[in-house]
Amino acid sequence: MAIDVRNITGRISGTGSKQSVSNEKSKRSENSASTSKLSDSLLLTDTASTLQRAEQLLSAIPIVNSTEVSEISESLSNGNYEVDSEHVAEKIIRMEQSLPS
């Protein structure tokens, strides 16, 4: 998600967090007529940084266990794949129980 902070002036604070956005251009023009390079800054909260890191880690995990898929495919091809009907029935019952009434 991109956030455009170019036109933000002043300081915005979140409730109960260290979230802030400041515009260096505005600050510098108020303090002096300096000709130095102007820049914007963004400070993320610890929670936002943690969520961003978690998203990066989760995106690296494959959705499908390719080793297990290939083992099952091989068993199906060889004709020796066995289904544990009691285990399947237990899973179906647990799923049914977890559904809202």
Image (spheres, rainbow, N blue to C red):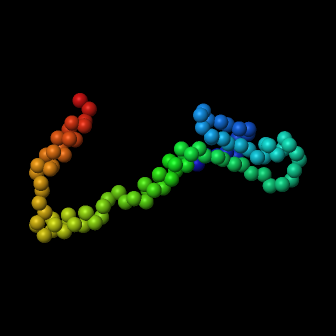
**Image coords of residue 84 (percent x, y):** 12, 54
Classify residue 2 as left or right of residue 41: left
Residue at left offset 51%, top offset 53%: 53
Q: Residue furthest top?
A: 101
Asked if residue 7 shows in the view, the reply is no
Left or right of residue 22: residue 101: left
42 on left or right of 63? right
Q: Where does the image place residue 6, in percent across and percent down from the top left?
A: 70, 46
Figure disc tally = 0
Q: What percent of the width, then of the height, locates residue 82?
A: 11, 60
Q: Residue at x 80, y 43 (%)?
A: 27
Residue 17 locus on image (x, y percent): 60, 37
Instruction: Name the quadrant containing residue 18.
Output: top right
- Can residue 2 be seen here? yes
Establish if 24 lies above or below 13. Answer: below
- What residue is rendered at 50% in x and 48% in y? 51
Which part of the image, by quadrant, shows the C terminus? top left
Q: Residue furthest right?
A: 33
Identify the residue at image location x=59%, y=34%: 16
- Side (left or right) of 89 relative to 20: left
Say above or below: 60 vs 94. Answer: below
Q: Quadrant of residue 94?
A: top left
- The answer to whether 5 is drawn above or below residue 64 in the figure is above
